[in-house]
Image (spheres, coloured by chain):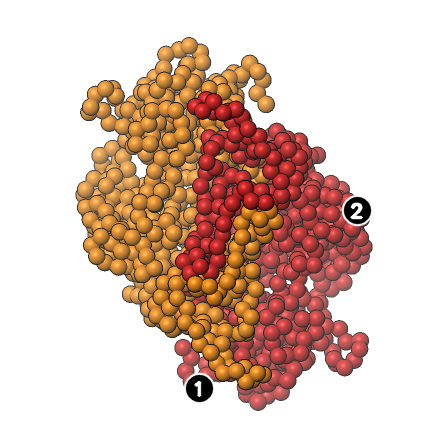
Chain colours: A red, B orange
Amino acid sequence: LASKTKHRVLILGGGFGGVFTAKHLRQPAGSDIHVELISRNNFLVFQPLLPEVAGGGIHPADAVSPLRLFLPGVSVRVGEVQEIDFAAKTVHVTARRGREITAVPYDHLVIALGEVVDLSRTPGLADRALVMKDVVDAFQIRNHVLGCMEEADSTPDPRRKRRLLTFVVVGGGFTGVETLGEMQELIRKSLRHYPSVRPDEVRIILVQHGARILPELPEHLAAYATDTLRRRGVEIMLKTGVKAVTSAGIETDSGLTLDAETIIAAIGNAPSPLMRSLPVPLDHGRIVVDRCLRVQGLDDVWALGDNAHIPLGDPNDDKTGYAPPLAQFAFREAKVLAGNVVAHLHGRPLTPFEYRSVGTMASLGGRSGVADILGVRITGFLAWAAWRLLYLSLLPGISTRIRVAVDWSLDLVISRSIVEIRPARFTSRYIRLLSGDVVVEPGFEPAGLYVVVSGCFELTSPATAADGAPARTRRLGPGDCFGMSFEGNAPPEPERVHACEDSTAYFVERGDLKRLALVTALLEKRGQTSVRTDPESA
Amino acid sequence: LASKTKHRVLILGGGFGGVFTAKHLRQPAGSDIHVELISRNNFLVFQPLLPEVAGGGIHPADAVSPLRLFLPGVSVRVGEVQEIDFAAKTVHVTARRGREITAVPYDHLVIALGEVVDLSRTPGLADRALVMKDVVDAFQIRNHVLGCMEEADSTPDPRRKRRLLTFVVVGGGFTGVETLGEMQELIRKSLRHYPSVRPDEVRIILVQHGARILPELPEHLAAYATDTLRRRGVEIMLKTGVKAVTSAGIETDSGLTLDAETIIAAIGNAPSPLMRSLPVPLDHGRIVVDRCLRVQGLDDVWALGDNAHIPLGDPNDDKTGYAPPLAQFAFREAKVLAGNVVAHLHGRPLTPFEYRSVGTMASLGGRSGVADILGVRITGFLAWAAWRLLYLSLLPGISTRIRVAVDWSLDLVISRSIVEIRPARFTSRYIRLLSGDVVVEPGFEPAGLYVVVSGCFELTSPATAADGAPARTRRLGPGDCFGMSFEGNAPPEPERVHACEDSTAYFVERGDLKRLALVTALLEKRGQTSVRTDPESA
């Protein structure tokens, strides 16, 4: 723990802004500052490498830098920021495991909580879409894509196969384009292992709201990227928005329906909801700071990165721009902010933040890319190589650099792994069934409870030799259940259930059912809640 | 698809037995056999390397071999075996994603479904324990251990710290001992990154029911292993059973209570429940086969590996032993079985299975091991090196071998990664709180709904300046809820909840709550089930 004479600087957020502020504060300040960093993860996610995790070229643990290795001398606390109390100069942090809350005091506070993904503006999208925020998300996309290839190779149903081989990326910015490029690379490299899947059966679609992709790059480069991707067979739908995601698929505002098993949402970046609870001025959900990165009206609170609204000139001038949410900006903001905290503590004048982008680049997968570096525009292999070199050099920590270099080298030498590592368990979810699909077979315990959402299912109890009863058939509609009972038991008699038209059911996985039953039982002890299951009442 | 003249051999199970049967069948038979393999995963888990995944020395995707790479020419289908219909010569398989059932026909069937983990004999164990069955389990143990280190480094509570730093392995066989050894290695190597954790605060305990550990090995080697582990500070409790796992910890039958955040169960191997549904003779849940690995009474069904009861001599002789559930046996059984299927198809006589173990070995972590190879007993570094060389050579597939060799080399050169990759989401679970722990703080949305299981919590609604109401306090007991409402909303007024004695609550995670509400809403459409929340009724 810090001695009492030390200034406690508390940094919230383990992204680029927070981590590099900690890095800079640790060095020049010598011993009169105690730096503590609070992060949701014990690592810094290196966002530019996430698409390669999604493409299977890099191991998930290699695309990130362990904070404790990169920040020796900084106290690292893994937890979620629950509440910030400016008056008491205290931050309340929840530990993930035990969920106990700890109050962490500060002298100076740096807010670098970044952004969250909010897909709520498009109905149904959040339920179905995979996102690309964290390294676990990226790894899940890799496994999901491989899972679709597996099932497409085995399914006897051509409609289901089409659906499994349709991959849609919503959002044509950096993340969307790079994820799409790497996903295509993964599919291309693994196709030879799936003999029943023909290359022309795979559909990869990019849905972009704007008039072009990669709005962050000059038009000329975006056009090159569009051409490259289209030549590889990617369907790029420009000026197209997503109206809703339903059981039939993605409905675009141009009236199309795309029936895809894989939907990746590379849109919806939004400020952390915690911002709204703070008594500070916000602009579009971002904390308003002055040019020295200090929060308006507070002497000891600073903010940077994607959760800060940072003027690049005089904020009273209408023409003043604001810092974009890019890692290179956060990186520089961190340096200025760390210097300003030290200057403030020592009574020296603060330095305003000034920075102009050195350029931007995007990888397109398949050893191609586009780059705009200090106005020089490069395309193709050179841009891709520059991309790799630059990011390898920017990766924090020697051991992380070695790991990524090894991953890249192995990917050149041996075939890319198609091992589908599943998440720990399959959760409850909507499932869509085509007419004729069999969901429950007699003689074996069903995997969970099914609740019909739309369409129609037919339940058949087979004829029993014992009591001479004939086969009986029952139709099930929305709200009806089949499979396991609510209590987690197998159906009382063997039954076979199939969809008699294209239908949607909500599948409650066995484990979820068990937890649900447990909660119900706990609540019933006090008569607070009752769950009755009475299949005959209407 | 196979042409009609081909014999369809269908193999159930992607473990050693199934995969090597497929490998052998593919080669000598030329073109008159069509081999299809059904596996839960698209890879073969190389069980001996799982402890190294748990220790973080090997990437999870590297400890497994992709089936499609290893078995070119074999049809691989990922799915769960739902039902076997011997009369119709058909197996029903469920696809994981869409849950549709496919009927797969066969001419010859090979059952190699292995074993499952069944912890139900010890009350409470299944709810809390981590297991070591699959590669995801092993990876989860690694992340769990690192998570405990993180939280132990930050918690201000000495009791919680003790609990977080207590690691218990139940079961002193191969899996238990090797997992313990690698876990200790991970903790030892990462300790320097956790400045608040002293080495002597870490407790690693092995609970073994039998009179010694490693019953599979000669007594002399087990004694060496025991000494080695004890010298490293591992507490080995012999002749100790687990009575129950409660919120207070693990209760042993010797009357001890071990309060541990980490419980790894390396016990409970049991035959797959599918076996019981089959109309075949079983012995201890295993399918009875003759010496040629044919299932009794069936001409076209074979079984091998851990789900088969395989006589090593005349089954009518009381002294006849049976094949133990070891990979080296499955490996040889596969060769004999494949040969017998081909012989049977060509009308040639069958070969009985005969094999004697060439020896066994166990790694103890920290570059030490024990080995008994053809009666020669080696200990220490040599045994460990032999272990690594042997398993590297046994690993199926060149690219998997390269990957593992690279992982091992990197582990010598750069520090082991302490990156804690979390599972995609935290699920609902029991949480235990110590007296005084704060669970809900006013001003921020709680993470879910809490149901009190035991103990007592105090809820405080702070005094409000607006209506002049004073602070109110309410006691909560078993069955009471706090935090989010059942509908997923924040509490109507700010509240603070803390445990007023050591207590247990069931935490229903936000996502689970949402799914639960969704199921309830679907069911209510038809009035089948109602969930009422009425806090005042008793």
Task: Please rate how many residues cluster around mark 1, counting C-alpha atoms within 10 Å: few if below 14, some from 14 to 19, many from 20.
Answer: few
Name the amino acid type tagged 2. Answer: Gly
Indicate the secondary structure of the residue bearing disc 2: loop
Task: Please rate how many residues cluster around mark 2, counting C-alpha atoms within 10 Å: few if below 14, some from 14 to 19, many from 20.
Answer: few
Residue lying at 40% horizontally and 52% vertically, measured from the top left: B141
Q: Position of residue B45 (x, y in %)?
A: 43, 39
Up the image or down, A305 lies above or below A365; here it is below
Q: Position of residue B116 (x, y in %)?
A: 38, 39
User: Which residue was labeled with disc 1?
Assistant: A5
Residue lying at 32% horizontally and 20% vertically, measured from the top left: B290
Residue lying at 33% horizontally and 69% vertically, measured from the top left: B159
Indicate the secondary structure of the residue bearing disc 1: loop
Camera-nearest label, 2 or 1: 2
Tell me the tag on residue A255: 2
Q: Quick one: label 2 or label 1, which is nearer the N terminus?
A: 1
Residue lying at 51% horizontally and 17% vertically, measured from the top left: B7
Q: Position of residue B531 (x, y in %)?
A: 52, 55
Quadrant of the image containing the C terminus of chain A: top right
Left or right of B537 on screen, residue A332: right
Up the image or down, A380 lies above or below B298; here it is below
